[in-house]
Image (cartoon, coloured by chain):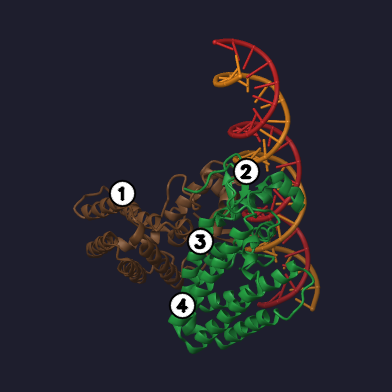
Chain colours: A brown, B green, C orange, D red
Amino acid sequence: MQVEPGGVVEAEAPGGDAVYGRLRRLIIEGHYAPGTRLVEDRLARDLGVSRTPVRQALARVAVEGLVQLFPNRGAVVRTFTHADLVDAYDLRAVMEGYAAYRAAGRISPGQLADLEAAAAALEGSLQQHFPTRQAEVHFLVEHNQRFHNTIIAASGNARLKALLPVVVDVPLQYRSFNWYTREERAVSNFFHRRILQALRAGDADRARALMQEHIYRGRDVLLESLDEHATTGVHQRSSEAQRD
Amino acid sequence: MQVEPGGVVEAEAPGGDAVYGRLRRLIIEGHYAPGTRLVEDRLARDLGVSRTPVRQALARVAVEGLVQLFPNRGAVVRTFTHADLVDAYDLRAVMEGYAAYRAAGRISPGQLADLEAAAAALEGSLQQHFPTRQAEVHFLVEHNQRFHNTIIAASGNARLKALLPVVVDVPLQYRSFNWYTREERAVSNFFHRRILQALRAGDADRARALMQEHIYRGRDVLLESLDEHATTGVHQRSSEAQRD
DNA sequence: ACCTGCATGATTGTATACAATCTGGCTCGC
DNA sequence: GCGAGCCAGATTGTATACAATCATGCAGGT
């Protein structure tokens, strides 16, 4: 979540450099596929700057876990094994479940309205026509993030808000499978509505349970899709770097 | 936790630079107090390297949240408000509670022995004499980390293991208050024993409950101590912006 | 007296040059 | 024919120089 132009992790951290945000976005959106070797010189040319800010940005995304750094041997876009994805989603379920639990007692009317709007946008998108598949995924990701981010913000725990992007921001390439079928999207919308309802009622336990199930469902769909396609370089050996 | 010389956050990331680990340690151990402005040139001289690796390291600790970066105005060691500490400990309770829950079904005999040893070391330290207060705190921190890290490792969730240091690694300055009184240390040891017992029995729910209470207790003691001392720049509102 | 605007010093952001290290293939010796 | 050691290319790690940006203090006008 939170992949804004100045896309930052720590709630505030506005700066450092814009290169960081650009690189982060490129990785998350899949322009550099998992397993790709990131040579500093090449990135520098791609981004139109020198190696210095590139190195900076690489160090930062490495802390987030989006790339792996090998001493004296450079950076590689992190590949996620099956187990990695399971771990990430399990953890996310715990953390966002906790966020929903806390949000139940604190969420403001304005935030409830935001949730309502995001849920409605996602529902409306089922009838909407998009020029490209990519545009559609972008739309879905954006409003889905809005929904989840609003709940996280409503939890009132700044640390949680700052930390969750690191858990959630897995390359889009993986996540896009979540909405592969219309049926799955309908199920997802169903959970959004139920979560919203629980938050309105102030039912913390139920909000958590629903959120956790919502996330677990996302995990299962993702893993099934990956197993079917079996491409996408999920189990790709890191030694094999794609040149372009 | 995990403040080893090569101290890294991502489980693997061995390199990048050693400067990162050193800077990280300096901040965590309180050599640079919260609120201190970190001028690159000065750090470079302190660490005996040029500004380049220092910048690198600053970017990384900023992602972790140990320092705040202000564009064109440099870095400042992060100050923790009362609310920040509450948030961090709440989150830690959730995450480590989850770790304990999972560990209950998976922990190995070897890991149980490690826990036993760490708990025994902490208990023995009550009768032990230390040359300085600092040496004592170091000993306590080390074995306490060993205890907690073992459980986290036993949880079998790599992502959790990689992420927790970011939540837990708050400047030592704050944490050292946790063991201010002998009584508090005894209580802490009591919980270690009970947690160990629950893990041995494979009682996941109980392990989680005990771990959470253990952490909440740590939080309370810390906050009370801080309120009493009221020094330490906790509520320090330096010129820089508070969080949202 | 106070506010505005500029000059100056300090500090960050970027680029480039060079040293250290690794990878891969080749030769030489067995 | 085959393996150990070395040489060359590529790439990372570090240092230094320079440009861009910001804070501060002072002067001058209203």
Residue displayed at 60% across by 49% down: B236
Q: Which residue bears the numbered disc 1?
A: A110
Quarter of the picture containing the N terminus of chain A is bottom left
Labels 3 & 2 near each other (Cβ < 8 A): no
* Crowd tier of the residue under label 2, counting other residues whose Cα lies within 10 Å: few below 14, some 14–19, many 20 or above: some
Secondary element at tag 4: helix
Looking at the rendered structure, the kind of residue marked 4 is Ala
Give amino acid for label 3: Val
Evaluate whether residue B160 shows in this view: yes
Tag of residue B86: 3
Please, is residue A11 above or below residue B103 in the view?
Answer: above
Q: Position of residue B82 (x, y in %)?
A: 54, 56
Q: Marks 3 and 1, Cα distance to the nearest angstrom?
A: 25 Å
If you read the primary sequence from the N terminus, does the residue marked by circle 3 or circle 4 appear first? Answer: 3
Left or right, residue B102 beside residue B221 = left
Check if mark 3's residue and mark 1's residue have beta carbons within 8 Å.
no
Q: Within 10 angstroms of label 3, few (less than 14), some, or many (20 or more) residues? A: many
Residue carrying label 4: B209
Which chain contains the residue that carries disc 4? B
Asked whether the residues under marks 2 and 1 belong to the same chain, the reply is no
Which secondary structure, mark 1?
helix
The x and y percentages for residue B131 are 80, 71
Give the Cα distance between marks 2 and 1. Answer: 36 Å
